Amino acid sequence: MNGPERLQQAAGKLTTKVGAAFPGTRAVFRGHDLHTGFDEKMGWFDLCAFGITGRRLQPAQLQVLEAIWVWTSYPDARIWNNRVAGLGGTTRTTTALAMSAAQAVSEATIYGRRNEFKALAFFKRTHAEMLAGSSLGECIDRHLKHQGKLAGYGRPLASRDERIEPTMALARKLGVGDGPHVTLAFEVERYLASVGKPLSMNFGALVSAFGADFGFSPRDYNLLYFPVFLAGMQPCYVEAVEKPPGTLFPTSCADVCYEGVARRGWPA
């Protein structure tokens, strides 16, 4: 079937497997009645994962993932994406615009969602290559040759990530802390140290390894994980709104060092 034929076949209708709304009667969510078709244990986080993947997470997996969200919610307006939320508040923009802008910059390559996307792909690929007979060193060398960087290792402001210890303690307590990709994440850290590259694992690597162990693809985990900073952004917005406008991180003109084009004269 060529392109025009595919478009003609799809015109005027929606073919879907994920669900549909029937106003006044019901809503269907992946084959289940949204209001009566799920058990009482279905929470919002569980529903999101089910909507993305079509499968239910295990209770222990849900508990670890929700704890990751809690332990990543830093209400500090100095953090890059929280700053956007706070600046939205100090300029009196709407809550939706402020949160949307802050979420958009959360996709940063170094700190944000692209980091975890790459890390999860690396863990899945490396685990498969090692099962096929490659050594960890060979896998890392191949990765660095083509990618140049190893996502999830190294942290700009501190060498130690304070979120790893409580996350691992909870995961081990729940019996999900020794999966193959989480184990691999720590092996990579030890290998890097052994070859003179002491890049400590950051939280992005660990949460990506859990995502791989729990059966997520990089895209699907990216969908589930993208609002992880939201609970820290909201207090920054609220606090900025409660202060006089423009008083969050004001910068004096005298503090700006301009090195661009010199002042020019304009013809009358």
Image (cartoon, rainbow, N blue to C red):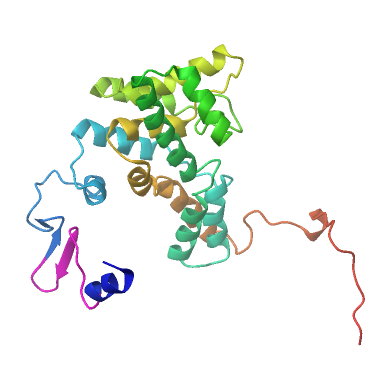
Q: Nearer the viewer, residue 219 or 48?
A: 219
Residue 116 seen in render: yes
173 versus 263 height, above or below = above
Image point 7% across, 56% down: which residue? 36
Picture coordinates of residue 70, whole percent (x, y): 37, 39
State which region is magenta: 11-26
Main SS category, magenta section: loop
Q: Nearer the viewer, residue 154 or 228?
A: 154
Dividing the picture into quadrants, the one containing residue 60 is top left
187 versus 244 height, above or below = above
Dividing the picture into quadrants, the one containing residue 73 is top left
91 versus 47 height, above or below = below
- What is the count of numbered marks? 0
Is 247 on the left-hand or right-hand side of 162? right
Dividing the picture into quadrants, the one containing residue 209 is top left
155 versus 49 height, above or below = above
Image point 57% across, 47% down: which residue? 80
138 falls in the magenta region: no
Picture coordinates of residue 235, whole percent (x, y): 46, 51
Which quadrant is home to the C terminus? bottom right
12 falls in the magenta region: yes
Which quadrant is home to the N terminus? bottom left
Picture coordinates of residue 247, whole percent (x, y): 64, 58
Is 198 on the left-hand or right-hand side of 38? right
Residue 239 seen in render: no
Is 94 on the left-hand or right-hand side of 248? left
Picture coordinates of residue 147, whole percent (x, y): 55, 36
Residue lying at the far bottom of the rendered structure: 268
Residue lying at the far top of the rendered structure: 194
Image point 42% across, 50% down: which residue? 230
